[in-house]
Structure formats: C-alpha cells, structure tokens
Amino acid sequence: MAGIQALQQLEQKLNQVILGKPQAVRLALCCLLSEGHLLIEDLPGLGKTTLAHALALSLGVHYKRVQFTNDMLPADLLGQSVFLRDTQEFQFRSGPIFSQILLADEINRASPRTQSALLEAMEEKQVSVDGLSYALPKPFFVIATQNPLFHAGTNALPESQLDRFLMRLALGFPDLQTEKLILQQDQGQSRLEGLSPCINEQQLLLLQQDVVQIKVSDALLDYLLALVTQSRQQQDCLPLSPRAAKALLRATKAFALMSGRHYATAEDVQQVFPSVAEHRLNPASSRDNQSLSLQLLRKVPCPL
C-alpha cells in the first residue's frame, strides 16, 4: 500500500512539471512498472526531454543522459576495453549504458550502427563486448526521445529496434490555457529544480513484482488475443507478434495496478493498446497518429 501511495505522489509531481498531459505521464509510469522501455516522439520544444528527465530525477536510482549525434559510436555508449601498460592487460571501461535509467536523447540522430548497440541491452539486460557479456543493473529502463523523421539529420529506427520499446508516446501541443500557464510560470527557472526522488530502488522493484501478481481473467485474455489476431488479418499494417502480445499484457496489468486494483479490465487494455501497438503496426507513423490501433479496437468486440 505504501508503494502505491508513493507511486501516486510520483505521478502528482510529474504532472506539476509536465502541465496538461496527465495521460502521457500515467502511460510513462505504466511503461516503467511494466519493465519495458519508453520512446517519446514529437516536435522539438514540446517537453519530450523534460518528461524523461523529470521521470529519471523522481526515482531514487542511478541514471545517465546521453545526447545521440551522427558521429556517435557504439563504444561511446557501451564502453570499451582499454590496454593498461602497468599490468599488460586489457580492462573493460563501462559506458553510460551501465545505469538504471538511461536517457537516450534524440536517439534517431545516431547512425543505425549505434542504434543497434541498444538491441541486446534492451532485450536481454546485458552487453557483450570483445566476446564477454556484462550484466546491466536492475531495474534497467531506457527512455528515448526522437524527432519526427522529416527533420534533417534523422535516421529512422528499424522495426527490430522499435519493437524493443514497449510504448511510444507523443505529448502534442498544450491547450491554450495550459500554454498560458506555462508562459506565466516562465521566470528563467526550470520546473525540474527541486525535484527529488519519491520512490527508491527497492520500492520500484517491489511495484514491478506486484504487476506480475495482477489477475487477468480468461475472458480478458481472449479479448487481448482477439486484438492481436485481428492485426494479423489486416492488409494495411504489420501483424502484432507474440512479443507484442506479452508487452500488451504487462502494460495492462501495470495500468490496473496504478488504478489501485488487483485485477485487470478491458478498459485497461484499451487505455494502453494505442501506445503499445501503433509503432508496431505502422513503424512509419509518427507523432500522435493512432489510427490503426483505434481501428482494431473498434473492430474487436469488447467483453462485458
């Protein structure tokens, strides 16, 4: 119960930093509890990095931020072996990926070679360098931001990379009242100042374990599988894989936990489905496009 209260406090703090976007904040936390990874895509200046930074600062875990650029190499992220003259041996020097929260800012500005360096880490929670594997710390959560593909200097993430992200979010423009409030509060100080952790590492790991214990009925599993199966019968999108189905189930359970319930409902599935499915159904889609996922939700009957 204490963990849920801390989680609610965390959500309130984030909503004080990211104004007018409570659903995006809730989904970001849902992704964290699901032990997945989060991709935030939108135009510059809409709060992508601020949300990622605020989420990292609000957790009592170790995090690092990496600004991805077109000249960045995999070793800049993973680390490399360095020859020590004193011992005449190579020693591995770990890179910034060895953190519990990795903020990969503007990930699609890096080359495909550097982007692919994240694949093993995001899927298997380990890094292989020079034939040796190194385990990453727990929890391990990647928050990546990217600019729309029509911006200069961007490289589209391949389908295999997109599939490693449990969710993709877009913040979008604030409404007029929220934007006016943002301007009124702009006094040269960042809203991130003074943001302190309200959930520690142990609490976060326990909450992630609680997600696994959320009950899912057979009828709800059938509904989830019906959505996945329907995607495989469509001609205008890519089919959802078993990995996507598992991601959808984890996100559904996490959303139920955040709602204070020990069981999941069809509404939980519907709330998380666009963020979990759209970037898998149509990798070329961008920003807040959720057309294919919403079509599937309309086509598949919802259980009572």
Image (cartoon, grey):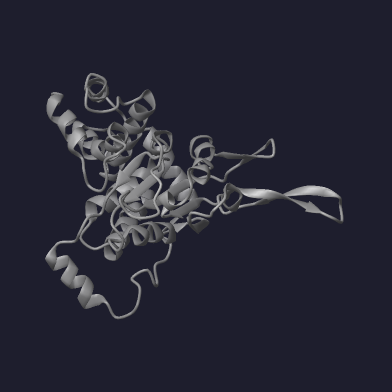
134 relative to 56 in the view: left or right? right
Is residue 125 shown left or right of residue 226? right
Q: Quadrant of residue 240?
A: top left
Quick one: 159 or 252, which is closer to the camera?
159
Camera sees residue 303: no
Q: Position of residue 217 (x, y in %)?
A: 26, 24
Residue 238, x across and y down, in percent: 29, 27
In the drawing, does residue 78 fall left or right of residue 52?
A: right
Q: Is residue 15 above or below residue 288?
A: below
Instruction: Work out whether 77 lies above or below 220.
Output: below
The C terminus lies in quadrant: top left
Q: Position of residue 124 (x, y in %)?
A: 53, 35
Residue 219's spot in the image, x, y percent?
A: 22, 21
Residue located at (20% from left, 31% from top):
266
Extreme front residue here? 152
Quarter-of-image position of residue 272: top left
- From the viewer's perspective, is residue 12 above or below residue 125? below
The residue at the point 51 percent across, 58 percent down is 64
